[in-house]
Image: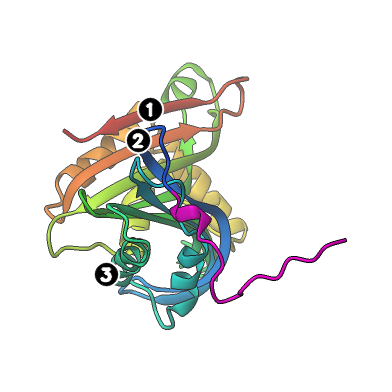
């Protein structure tokens, strides 16, 4: 079998070949990349596992992009990431492959310390974070979180002789900050959970269960009430330029879930 000898220092650059179909690509890149991240949220710094997506736009004349360089940029960064450094990482990706636009998204769990309302037992509660960054012809940073909480149905309470159906719910919010402003992940979490019928705790005793159950019963909310309360809090915060918020109730006595969403103008 014949052997082919190639100059390893002069291998063909297939991705840079010309493409004649005349179709630009808005996004092309790598997704589902697991890579560690140490992130600072002003209130705390945590090391966690990130699920990354890195992409660029591709001009119509170029056949492909050099995706290995995206991973090189991630591996070269050492230290604590912030919103500013994530934006700089996105810029480096754009420049490394000479693209017009670059996009970076990372998802990771974040933990807050919660103190039980009566027993004062302390535990950590986790929630999901997603940060999306873009640079090039359009630049921006969007921070999203998903916060678990409890909801209790006002209608069920009103029509029942005793009790009311309640369930876990999830509050989701995405925000873009005004220039020079930022809200910590922990503060975003607190804004969200204040809008629910009651909060969740990782460590509670019987006295706490009584308190949380009665708190939810005294604060019944439809999914519409919860999302409006959340939107009202976000809309009144001058640090927030734009937001989208939604709430989903994982209904306990229905075969469906209920949801509501508000997007700022």
Is residue 128 found left or right of 237 in the rendered image? right
The label nearer to you, 1 versus 3, is 3
The tag on residue 260 is: 1
Residue 139 is situated, as x and y percent measured from the top left of the image, at 22, 53
Q: Earlier in the sequence, mark 3 or mark 2?
A: 3
Crowding around mark 1 (Cα neighbors within 10 Å: few <14, some 14 to 19, many 20+) is some
Q: Secondary structure at mark 3?
A: helix
Question: Quick one: SS at disc 2?
Answer: helix
Q: Which residue, as the protein is rendered here, is positioned at the far bottom?
A: 79
Instruction: Give the Cα separation between the discs numbered 3 and 2.
Output: 32 Å
Instruction: Tell me, yes or no, whether the two marked residues, 1 and 3, touch with CB atoms within 8 Å.
Output: no
Which scheme is used to colour this image of the protein?
A: rainbow
- Name the residue located 33 percent from the left edge and 34 percent from the top edge: 227
Q: Which residue is mark 3?
A: 84
Which numbered disc, 1 or 3, marks the residue that appears first in the sequence? 3
Relative to the observer, which residue lies in front, 219 or 186? 186
Residue visible at 22% across and 46% down in the picture: 234
Q: Is residue 111 visible?
A: no
Q: Is disc 2 in contact with disc 1, using a CB cutoff of under 8 Å? A: yes
Task: State which region is magenta.
Answer: 1-17
- Say whether residue 43 is left or right of residue 50: left
Specify which label sits upstream in the sequence, 2 or 1: 2
The N terminus - image quarter:
bottom right
Q: Main secondary structure of the magenta part?
A: loop
Residue holding disc 2: 226
Q: CA distance from mark 2 to mark 1?
A: 9 Å
In the rendered image, the residue lying farthest to the front is 2
Q: Nearer the viewer, residue 231 or 35?
A: 35
């Amino acid at each position: 079998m014949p052997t082919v000898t190639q100059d390893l220092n002069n291998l063909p650059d297939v991705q840079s070949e010309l493409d004649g179909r005349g179709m630009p690509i808005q996004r092309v890149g790598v997704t589902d990349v697991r890579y560690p991240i140490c992130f600072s949220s002003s209130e705390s710094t945590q090391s966690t596992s990130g699920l990354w997506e890195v992409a660029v736009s591709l001009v119509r004349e170029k056949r492909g992009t050099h995706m290995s360089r995206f991973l090189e940029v991630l591996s070269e960064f050492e230290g604590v990431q912030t919103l500013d450094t994530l934006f700089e990482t996105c810029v480096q990706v754009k420049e490394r492959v000479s693209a017009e636009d670059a996009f970076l998204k990372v998802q990771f769990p974040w933990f807050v310390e919660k103190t039980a309302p009566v027993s004062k037992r302390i535990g950590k509660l986790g929630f999901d974070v997603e940060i999306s960054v873009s640079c090039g012809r359009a630049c921006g940073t969007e921070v999203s979180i998903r916060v678990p909480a409890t909801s209790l149905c006002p209608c069920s309470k009103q029509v029942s002789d005793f009790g009311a159906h309640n369930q876990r719910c999830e509050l989701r919010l995405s925000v873009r900050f005004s220039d020079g402003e930022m809200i910590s992940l922990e503060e975003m979490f607190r804004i969200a959970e204040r809008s629910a019928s009651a909060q969740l705790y990782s460590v509670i005793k019987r006295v706490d269960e009584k308190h949380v159950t009665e708190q939810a019963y005294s604060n019944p909310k439809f999914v519409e009430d919860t999302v409006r309360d959340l939107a009202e809090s976000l809309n009144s915060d001058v640090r927030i330029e734009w937001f989208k918020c939604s709430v989903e109730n994982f209904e306990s006595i229905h075969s469906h879930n209920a949801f509501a969403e508000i997007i700022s103008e």
